[in-house]
Image (cartoon, rainbow, N blue to C red):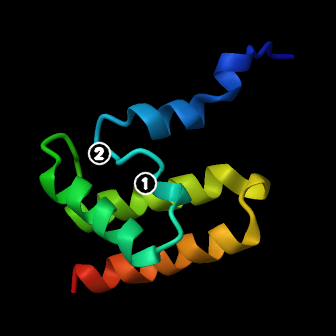
Amino acid sequence: MSQRTGSSNNWSAKVTRESFALELEAGVFTWQDPKRIALSLKHSADTSTRRKAEPLRSAMSMLVFYINRAGKNLDAEQKLILEQAKDELRALYR
């Protein structure tokens, strides 16, 4: 049986806060406007000098990571907004 401390259980929150690949705007995943979320993620990905993949993939990875890690704690309305942000992000890179 492995022992876990409170801090090791919150590793996903730390990744979101301290990602070395993208510098995210504070609260970006709590915003109510999918287009604004997508534009912010695009800006972060486009200006990052530390990402390892192309901008769309990096931005989408952070968004999907947040959705997956929030899991049951993400209310249905916010999940819908974030899913719409994925579509907006794809459209911005077309």
Which amino acid type is marked by label 2?
Leu
Q: Image point 47% across, 74% down: which residue? A: 33
Q: Quadrant of the N terminus?
A: top right
- Where is residue 10? Give x, y as percent: 65, 29
Q: Residue at x 26, y 65 (%)?
A: 42
Q: Position of residue 29 (x, y in %)?
A: 51, 57
**Left or right of 75 on screen, residue 66:** left
Q: Is residue 16 left or right of residue 90?
A: right
**Disc 2 designates what residue?**
22
Residue 77 sits in quarter: bottom right
- Which residue occupies the extreme front position in the image? 32
Against 50, is 59 above or below? Answer: below
Q: Tell me where residue 68 sits by quadrant.
A: bottom right
Q: Residues within 10 Å of mark 1 (few under 14, many from 20)?
A: many
* Distance between mark 2 and mark 1 Cα atoms: 8 Å
The answer to whether residue 86 is left or right of residue 11 is left
Q: Position of residue 69 (x, y in %)?
A: 64, 49
Mark 2 closeness class: few <14, some 14–19, many ≥20 residues within 10 Å: many
Looking at the image, which residue sits at the far right? 1
The picture places residue 12, in percent across and down from the top left corner, at 58, 37
Q: Amino acid at mark 1?
A: Met
Residue at 21% of width from left, 87% of height from top?
Answer: 94
- Asked whether disc 2 touches disc 1, contact meaning CB atoms under 8 Å apart, the reply is yes
Q: Label 1, on which residue?
A: 62
Residue drawn at 46 percent across, 75 percent down: 34
Looking at the rendered structure, the secondary structure element under dot 2 is: loop
**Secondary structure beneath label 1:** helix
Question: Looking at the picture, does residue 20 appear above or below residue 68?
Answer: above
Task: Name which of mark 2 and mark 1 comes first in the sequence.
Answer: 2
Using residue 69 as the reference point, say whether residue 18 is left or right of it.
left
Q: How many marks?
A: 2
